[in-house]
Amino acid sequence: MASTAELEKIVTQVRRDIIRMVHAVNSGHPGGSLGCTEYLVALYFDIMKHNPSKFTMDGVGEDLFFLSNGHISPVFYSVLARSGYFPVKELATFRKLNSRLQGHPTTHEHLEGVRMASGSLGQGLSNAIGAALAKKLNKDNSIVYSLHGDGELQEGQIWEAAMYASAKNVDNLIATVDMNGQQIDGSTDKVLNMGSLRAKFEAFGWHVLDLEKGNDMASVVNALNTAKTHTGKGKPVIILMKTEMGNGVDFMMGSHKWHGVAPNDEQLAQALNQNAETLGDY
Amino acid sequence: MKKYTYTEKKDTRSGFGAGLSELGKTNPNVVALCADLTGSLKMDAFAKDHPERFFQVGIAEANMIGIAAGLTIGGKIPFTGTFANFSTGRVYDQIRQSVAYSDKNVKICASHAGLTLGEDGATHQILEDLGLMKMLPGMVVINPCDYNQTKAATIAIADHHGPVYLRFGRPTVPNFTPADQKFEIGKAVMLNEGTDVSIFATGHLVWKAIEAGEQLAAQGISAEIINIHTIKPLDNSAVINSAKKTKCVVTAEEHQMNGGLGDSIAQLLARELPTPLEMVAVNDSFGESGTPAQLMTKYGLDAINIVEAAKKVIARKA
């Protein structure tokens, strides 16, 4: 078990990776990536049972993670590299020609750690359910995790999957929603108000957990550990995780404007000043 | 003209059901998913014999494709079942991202394809599915001609690692393929050697091509008849060798001209061996309600249409 302080050191480095990757190609999605950094670091460095040095597609005996909102690939790639799936220096190839680090994650380039392409939204929950069903058939009692954007929940397939998971007792699944309240055209409330997601998921038969401080490492670890205690009880589990888009970079916080925009040179320097190098830049 | 006989008419979807049932007994990794059409797809036997490996997903095809993709992670070989329309057009993006682009070993099995679905009408009669599926990189596209061939194809695709689209239909049609004929993906089946015209047919049009061959023979025309059960990968050498010999080609399928078998063969011949070609297919039109036989006649997919196309293309030879 990693200490909170150790995990926070990784978070700071991952933030630097995200900002530098996006800046280098002047494209990508920094806002949502920064908001989910604590969650992904907690998952890969503390919560999940997994084997980064020997990646297999089937992941038998390992916990699995599916990134449904594939546009936050910068944080996913950084966490995969930092946890040992592939060389950290490969982060420098993000979004460039002939790279395994495509704009949105893919299995097509055989990047270790990625088990499903994502980017077209709304598909990851179904994928995670399928993997969870395969684990049950294989008598593998590991857990399947998935992450979704809140805006992504506007896709109908999410609700097909949500209905299925409870009706068929897929209880080895912990989904998390990144509730940053933002999407491309503005706040989620303004674009398409989804009402109470707690009430919706409860009505769909899920065990719902609230995580109010999704950018506080101790709270994130605690919520994921609590979620684990609710697996195996007949219901799928979902964490509604409130985060701040752009967290850790003051000028990116509190706005949807940094969903898919890269910082310029000056903004890069400013952002890096706020996040000291802890594990060594790639 | 070689004589083809059959003892009974059977539906190709039952061939799928029988193949799936056999796979259930022989391959423990095979799992099946269905979107509320278990009886129509003839998946009942598998569902009854292997309830732990059968997933009823309800009327939610997008979720079905997504779950199937996920099930491959852990070594399962998922066979999804619904009508061809809901197996392709409705879930194109799910197939594209979660199955084809993700290189997942999913078998998309689609019944009630084409006009022969009949009375339900054009909402259900997809005539674009072969085109949609063959455009996806890495997708294998198979359209067998009768019960025995569909059963053999179902069993064969379990051993092929990668995404496959298997298309079959609702009505009973002559079952003439030998029950022990091995199904080889991408390998065309020579049904009759001939010298005047090559007829390349797929699916339900294969039997009609045989009938057309008999009519042509009676008129002194020697037709080469080849069953192209695999649209992709196309058996290029079978097409080119036959076209070299006869110097003119007819294609026949229960699909739009755009995107179907004829389109694939026309592309190949244009590149490799420009040859006069006529297509028996639906010409940029939706279907409608009617009996399968009425619809095949109205939309020009009968043996007589193949005969006319053959005469027309022979007349175009240089």
Image (tube, coloured by chain):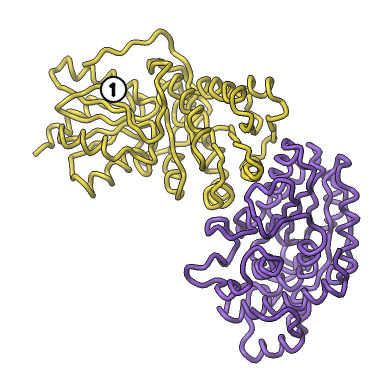
Where's residue B75, x and y in %?
Answer: 63, 40
Q: Choose between B92 and B107: the one closer to the eye.
A: B107
Name of the residue lying farthest toward the front: A53
Q: Is residue B243 visible?
A: yes
Q: Hey, what amino acid is under mark 1?
A: Leu
Where's residue B219, x and y in %?
Answer: 14, 17
Residue at figure coordinates x 38%, y 15% from the top left: B176
Quarter assignment of residue A49: bottom right
Q: Choose between B136 and B71: the one closer to the eye.
A: B71
Quarter assignment of residue B50: top right
- Quadrant of the image containing the N terminus of chain B: top left
B313 sits left or right of B264 in the view: left
Drawn colour of chain A? Answer: purple
A64 sits left or right of B135 in the view: right
- Quadrant of the image containing the C terminus of chain B: top left
Drawn colour of chain B? Answer: yellow
Residue at figure coordinates x 19%, y 36% from the top left: B243
